Structures are given as structure tokens and as C-alpha cells.
């Protein structure tokens, strides 16, 4: 590793790590490949030597030897929306902790065959597993011509359900909780600003709203559909103002709720004195609105971490499908909801 001045230094190899750590090359290989039965003090010594030398294992060679790439492919919309973005960040952090890297392919919403094409691209790159964080319905069954295990955040169906991990969305229960909260305050009914209905999450939240109203025999007001962004929430808010008899609204995400609040403010309606409002996601800005937004907390990080753990278990030998149930919906009550009498 000496700099002789004759050109760029060669990258550090496993022999260099072994020499610095004072162990055999075999021990270095066992540590780098995360094999068991290595004493902890030796493992730490090897890892410290690797860090000092800037050693990077040859992943292509490891793939040939072990039949693995230590890489997981992710199909994502590449959206800046809070939910998909938070999930992607959590997946990357969780993968890094398990010794895997991520390869991400982004699709465009509404692109025909986009998900299938993204899967084919990842398989051709060489991945040990695939994460479908894609939250939309492409309108057809997906064909996955590979035996790698799959983690799905929406719908999991053959041919890869037999060795996949499915995160069961809690959107139905969460939509029910949000609507029940408003009904429990004494509102005669609850209006709903839904997300785009190609998204599984939007469908689930709409279904939960309907279940809560049906349980108490309340007729459904017309459903207004947005696109998750504040501008569509604002447009829905203008329609709600025109309806004239709205006292409570469940909005399918916090960003659209911001737009609804803006429309109410421009019309001279106060939240919650005139209209109560519940959002969804518990995004970082929800607590700092005026008034602070009552919302449903979504544990994006917890679902991603546990889901990836189950996927890695299947990559490394576990078999059979797994269904991960999301934790119960958590209502975060803040200042945007109140009984209708407060008006």
C-alpha cells in the first residue's frame, strides 16, 4: 500500500485487511460475508481495519461465489409525497444495516406496463429480492419471471406470493377511526376528500370512511377526489364551501388537507369552529399548521424496517409467504376538530 510515486495506488484488498488486523484472510472473508461463529473482538478488528484502508469487497466476485448480489431492487414512483418518500428512506437505511444495497427504478404513474418493465430491469441488473413500494393499481396481474422473493406494499398475488412478504395496509381501519372520531364529536355526517382511486391506499381510506358511516346509518355525502397535492385539496375545499352544509371533513392525506383549509379560510370559515378537519399521514408539518391538524399517524419507517427484515430472511433461506399486519391506526388529536356546537 506504499505510495511509490509511480501512479495511483491500487485499492486495498482482503490480504491488506488481514495483515493490518493480524488475522487470516479466511477470517476476513467470513467477516465480510457476515458468516456466523466469528468472535466479536475479531469481527470488530477486521471491520476497523477495513474502514481504515477504505476496503470495498468485490460484490461481483461474492455473487459468483455465494450466488448472491447483496442487492435488493426497489420499484418506486419516485414521488416527493411524504408517504412514498418516507418509505423509500426507511428502506435504504434498513437495507444498509443488513449489509444490502438498494437499486431503485422509478416509474411514472399511468405508464402502461411500467411496473413490469421496472421489475425486468432490476432482474437484469442482478438483485436478490424485489420491493414493490409501488402504491398504484396498474390494472393487470404482474408477471415476474424470476424466483427471487418479493416484498409488496400493496397487493401480492401469484406467481410470487408463495415466497413473498405482503404488508397488509391498515388504511381501511384508519379511515374508519378518522371518521368515527368526527362522528363521536356530534357531527351529523362526515364528508370525504379522497385520494386518486388508482392508489390502493386511497381506496382503503375511502372504504374505511364508508364503513364508519354505514355502521351508524348515516347516508354518504358525495365523494370528492384529489391527487394528494394541496392544489387539489383547495379545489375540493371550494366545492365543500359551495355545498353549504359541511361541518366535518376527513381528508385522505395532510397535503390535501392544507389546501382544504386554505379554501375554508378564504370563504371565511373557521377551523374547527365552523368545520372540523382530519388529515392522514401525520406529516412533519401537520403539527405546525394554524390550527394544528388532527391526523392519523402512519408508521412508514416501522413497516419498511420489519418488511425488509422478512424479505432478507427469505433471501437467506427462509421459505413461505409472510403477511405483516400494520399496527392499529393511531389518531393524533390536535386543534382542527371540535363538536359542532362550538360554532
Image: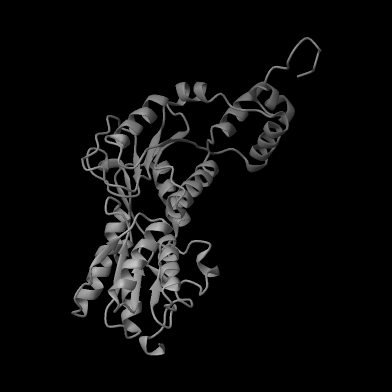
Task: Write down the quadrant of residue 105 in the picture.
Answer: top left
95 and 331: which is toward the camera? 331
137 and 145: which is toward the camera? 137
198 and 230: which is toward the camera? 230
Residue 270 rendering spot, x and y as whole percentages = 44, 79
Residue at x 27% of width, y 69% of height: 209
**Residue 139 visible:** yes
Q: Look at the picture and state if 326 lies above or below 68.
A: below
Tell me how many marks there are: 0
- Identify the image's colour scheme: rainbow, by chain, secondary structure or one colour: one colour
Q: Is residue 21 left or right of residue 343?
A: right
Residue 75 rendering spot, x and y as whole percentages = 38, 39
Q: Is residue 104 left or right of residue 244?
A: right
Q: Quadrant of the C terminus?
A: bottom left
Name of the residue lying farthest toward the top: 6
**Residue 176 visible:** no
12 and 113: which is toward the camera? 113
Residue 284 rendering spot, x and y as whole percentages = 53, 62
Name of the residue lying farthest toward the bottom: 341
Residue at x 35% of width, y 33% of height: 118
Q: Is residue 338 left or right of residue 246?
A: right
Residue at x 44% of width, y 47% of height: 309
Q: Look at the picture and state if 150 lies above or below 296.
A: above
Residue 331 rendering spot, x and y as whole percentages = 41, 72
Q: Quadrant of the N terminus?
A: top right
Q: Look at the picture and state if 27 lies above or below 152.
A: above
Q: Is residue 137 left or right of residue 17?
A: left
Amino acid at each position: 500500500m506504499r505510495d511509490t510515486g509511480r501512479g495511483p495506488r491500487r485499492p486495498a484488498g482482503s490480504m491488506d485487511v488481514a495483515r493490518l488486523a493480524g488475522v487470516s484472510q479466511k477470517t476476513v472473508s467470513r467477516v465480510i460475508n457476515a458468516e456466523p461463529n466469528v468472535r466479536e473482538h475479531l469481527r470488530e478488528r477486521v471491520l476497523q481495519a477495513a474502514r481504515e484502508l477504505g476496503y470495498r469487497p468485490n460484490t461481483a466476485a461474492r455473487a459468483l461465489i455465494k450466488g448472491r448480489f447483496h442487492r435488493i431492487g426497489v420499484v418506486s414512483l419516485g414521488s416527493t409525497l411524504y408517504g412514498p418518500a418516507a418509505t423509500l428512506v426507511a428502506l435504504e437505511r434498513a437495507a444498509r444495516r443488513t449489509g444490502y444495497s438498494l437499486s431503485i427504478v422509478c416509474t411514472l404513474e399511468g405508464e402502461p406496463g411500467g411496473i413490469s418493465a421496472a421489475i425486468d430491469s432490476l432482474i437484469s441488473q442482478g438483485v436478490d429480492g424485489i420491493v414493490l413500494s409501488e402504491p398504484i393499481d396498474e390494472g393487470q396481474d404482474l408477471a415476474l419471471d424470476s424466483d427471487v422473493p418479493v416484498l409488496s406494499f400493496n397487493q401480492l398475488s401469484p406467481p410470487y406470493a408463495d415466497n413473498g412478504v405482503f404488508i397488509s395496509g391498515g388504511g381501511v381501519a384508519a379511515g374508519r377511526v378518522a371518521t368515527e372520531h368526527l362522528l363521536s364529536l356530534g357531527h351529523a355526517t362526515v364528508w370525504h376528500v379522497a385520494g386518486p382511486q388508482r392508489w390502493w391506499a386511497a381506496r382503503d381510506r375511502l372504504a374505511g370512511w364508508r364503513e364508519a358511516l354505514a355502521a351508524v346509518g348515516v347516508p354518504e355525502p358525495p365523494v370528492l377526489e384529489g391527487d394528494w397535492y394541496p392544489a387539489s385539496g383547495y379545489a375540493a375545499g371550494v366545492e365543500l364551501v359551495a355545498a353549504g352544509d359541511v361541518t366535518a371533513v376527513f381528508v385522505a392525506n395532510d397535503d390535501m388537507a392544507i389546501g382544504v383549509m386554505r379554501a375554508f379560510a378564504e370563504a371565511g370559515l373557521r377551523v374547527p369552529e365552523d368545520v372540523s378537519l382530519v388529515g392522514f399521514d401525520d406529516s412533519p408539518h401537520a403539527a405546525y399548521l394554524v390550527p394544528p391538524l388532527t391526523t392519523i399517524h402512519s408508521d412508514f419507517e416501522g413497516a419498511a424496517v420489519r418488511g425488509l427484515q422478512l424479505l432478507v430472511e427469505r433471501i437467506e433461506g427462509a421459505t413461505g409467504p409472510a403477511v405483516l399486519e400494520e399496527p392499529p391506526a393511531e389518531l393524533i388529536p390536535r386543534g382542527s376538530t371540535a363538536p359542532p356546537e362550538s360554532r
